[in-house]
Amino acid sequence: MKRFSIFSIFLIVNIISGQNPPIKKTSKQKDTTSFFFKKGNKTQQSKLTIANYLIISKQNDTTFVDTTLTIKKDYKFNYLRKNNFNFIQFANTGQTYNTLSIDNSTNNIMPGFAAQARHFNYLETNDIDYYRVPTPLTELYYKTVFSQGQNLDAFFTVNISPQLNFSIAYKGLRSLGNYQNSLTSTGNFRFTTNYQSDNKKYNMRSHIVMQDLFNQENGGLTDEDVIRFKEGDEEIQDRSVFDPNFENADSVLEGKRFYIDQSYAILSKKDSTSVNNLFFVNTISFQNRFFEYNQTTSANNFFGSSFSNTIQDKVTLEEFYSDLGLNYSNKLLGEIAFKVNYNSINYGYNSLVFLNNQTITNRIKEEFFGFEVAYNNQIGKLKLEGKLGANFSDNIKGNFLDFKGKYQLLDNIDLFAGINVNNRLPNYNKLLYQSNYTNYNWDNREIFKTIETQQLSFGLNSEKYININFDITNIENYAFFKLESIQNDIKVIKPIQNDKAIQYLRVKIQKEFRLGKFALDNTIMYQNVKSDENVINIPSLISRNTFYFSDEVFKKALKFQTGITFNFFSEYYGNGYDPLLAEFYTQNQTKIGGFPRLDFFVNAKIRQTRIFLKAEHFNSSFSGNNYFAAPNYPYRDFTIRFGLVWNFFL
């Protein structure tokens, strides 16, 4: 609550100070915001535009602040602040998401940490942006939640000088939820800075991120209550009446990361005739995180037998990364980069486990080197990007190749194609895991092989005509959690590695049709998995269709949108959720999906403020009670939620 008090004060200060300067939008299609300021009794227009407020990604892709009101902004107005087309949310804000589609293209060749179901809102290095602004910029995000709480994301950035920028932000959430023992309380603190020397030879970017994601766990509804839920029993219309599988557990994921990357120009372009640039580059990153599951009294009828009556499982991971390299660029040859990196990892527990005459070790500790090579070039209308890298380690094996090409066929049509090859070990919690519950102890380091994926992708991007994305992936040695058996009503879940190849096909089409002030935005994805066993379970069809009306009133001072969004995914054996592991597992007993989700919304924009009002899942009372995000975990009931995003240009 102290955190929310601080940011409430922060909100009030910025509301007061953010009333000037007024901003005028000069174009319907682009966010060409212009600025005005007063000098004496005269109002003058500044030369600044919204395009001067830059956002720079880790990959050096640069965009600018966007205060427009579009349907894409509605799709991103959620807890993750991302387009959640591929996800189905659990009942409470801040809980996990079931994944409806899998993207197998990655350059990451390190195993992932435990509790991947808790990582949807965990900010990784690639999620952090840097900024360059001519005047201080503030953004405030607010959205109501499910009973007794709020969701606030407050951000501020300023350039102290043209060379030095810093930003500070905090996203906080507290939501009690409608079901027993489902409280969520999370916080993401971010601090960034970037600096460029006066002679522009030295560049530095750095960030500090601290995150804590707390969730109460209840194991979902009992099988008996699932039946009552589907039948629409009037006694349980108040969802707090349900008795879940247990009400005495919670889990927390915490992490801290310190990151810096820097470059120095050994040879730099001095005039228009110079064609060569040579940079020395360096990155240093240190991160530690832990996941802890606590339960005051063991739930032996749910997880099985335990070593003790009180459960306190904790696993930690410390990661140190550093690299040194050179970047060479030439107008004809493009940009070539090479670097050597060093990794140190320490994953594990503080004790050994003796079980069934076997010893479960407690640590995976490795130190090793690796390398990475990258190439970028623009040849006329053709843009090429390529990367490859590998680990020099016998135990943490991994390598990747990623190559992409994009060709501008016409002014509004881009063609693209790519290939991604990745070999890496399964996540750490599949290799080694310990718990007070006896069923959750294993050591697969000598058994599991590297997961091998090869993905081909191509498509067409055109806002005017259509967007088409196609990819096909071959996966070997796929590792996953599986419902291995059910013994005396207790589900036994174990990590498994499939020894047969899997082919995975995805086709995604997006097109918006417009007629005057009316529009119909459509996104449809078809998926197909070919394997000898049900290893990867996904719906064959995912669809999102939004019909809406847009207009401007009060002399164009207010722009608004109103409409209905239809969400649907076909029925399939949805992955189950294990609260102890904080992971999803493959099961082939219970189907979910096949139910429509209708949301009615009214969105508005006044100057640089976007307001969102939505009646979520308003069809829940008349379209049946078979809506679940995972087996035994219902999707959200009908609710009305409100929120806003407010930018201040001081």
Image: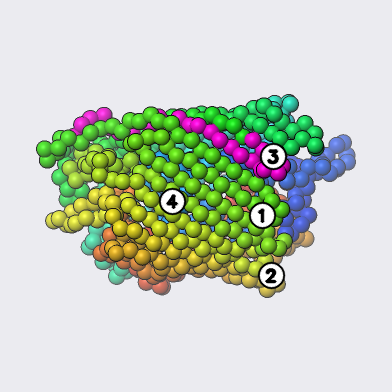
Vertical order, 581 against 159 (above or below): below
Viewer-nearest of labels 3 and 2? 3
In the displayed structure, 170 sits above or below 72; it is above
Of 478 and 374, nearer the camera is 374
> Residue 483: which quarter of the image?
bottom left
Disc 3 from disc 2: Cα separation: 48 Å
Q: What residue did someone put label 4 on? A: 93
Question: Badges 1 and 3: C-beta atoms under 8 Å apart?
Answer: no
Q: Give the structural element (helix, strand or loop) at label 1.
A: strand
Front-lying residue, 596 or 120: 120
Task: Name the residue at 36% across, 60% down.
Answer: 502
Any part of residue 611 in sight: no
The residue carrying mark 2 is 517
Q: Main secondary structure of the magenta part?
A: strand
Distance of mark 1 from mark 3, alpha carbons?
16 Å
For label 1, the residue is 382
- Residue bounds of the magenta highlight: 328-353
At label 2, which amino acid type do we have? Lys
Q: Are marks 4 and 3 in contact (CB under 8 Å)?
A: no
Circle 3: residue type:
Asn
Horizontal placement of 603 versus 344: left or right? right
Q: Quadrant of the N terminus?
A: top left
Q: In the image, which disc is placed on residue 330?
A: 3
How far separated are the C-alphas under marks 2 and 1? 36 Å
Type of amino acid under label 1: Leu
In the image, farthest residue toward the left:
357
